[in-house]
Image (cartoon, rainbow, N blue to C red):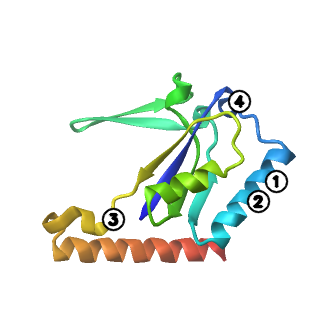
Amino acid sequence: MRVMVLVKADKQSEAGVLPNREILTAMGKFNEELVNAGVMLAGEGLRPSAKGVRVRFSGAKRTVLDGPFAETKELLAGFWIWQVKSMDEAIDWLKRSPFQETEVEIRPIFETEDFGAELTPELRAQEERVRARADDLTRAEKR
């Protein structure tokens, strides 16, 4: 199963305060353990909400809202995507992380088979094409 691990923002991350060398070292070591175990598929830190926007949808209307956003507890500072055998395994890994004071959420990612008959063979083929193209773009970007 794949899960998304969502690291909540706090006043420091929203102020744009970057982690110090000690935190970067500890997180780098943890990320290396995740990669070596075949768990980490992706992971990134996010810039403060002041650098972002939200797009609100209401019927055909789209409204763009500029950051920063007020409710820090609703914001994210970073994420991982992990491949694990179970939610328990994801929790075990997260407990090993070097975090000291934060809240982190783990959410399962929908897999193709979760959509059942609604995902027709045509839609499944389209999904596979889109994923393959996205993978190609990711590989090209890394070169």
Q: Distance of mark 4 from mark 1, alpha carbons? A: 18 Å
Residue that label 3 marks: 111
Disc assigned to residue 12: 4
Residue 13's image quarter?
top right
Asked where in the image residue 133 lies, by quadrant, the reply is bottom left
Relative vertical location of residue 11 with respect to residue 135 in this rendering, above or below:
above
Taking the spot 74% from the left edge, 53% from the top edge, the residue there is 27
Residue 29's disc number: 2
Horizontal and vertical percent for residue 134? Answer: 45, 71
Q: Amino acid at mark 2?
A: Lys
* Residue shown at the point (57%, 67%) measured from the top left: 39
Q: Residue at x 53, y 22 (%)?
A: 70
Residue bearing the label numbered 1: 25
Report the front residue among 136 and 113. Answer: 113
Q: Residue at x 76, y 40 (%)?
A: 18
Foreground of the two, 33 or 124:
33
Q: Is 7 displayed left or right of 118 in the figure?
A: right
**Given this view, does label 4 or label 2 mark the residue nearer the observer?**
2
Judged left or right of residue 61, residue 135 is right
Q: Nearer the viewer, residue 127 or 81?
A: 81
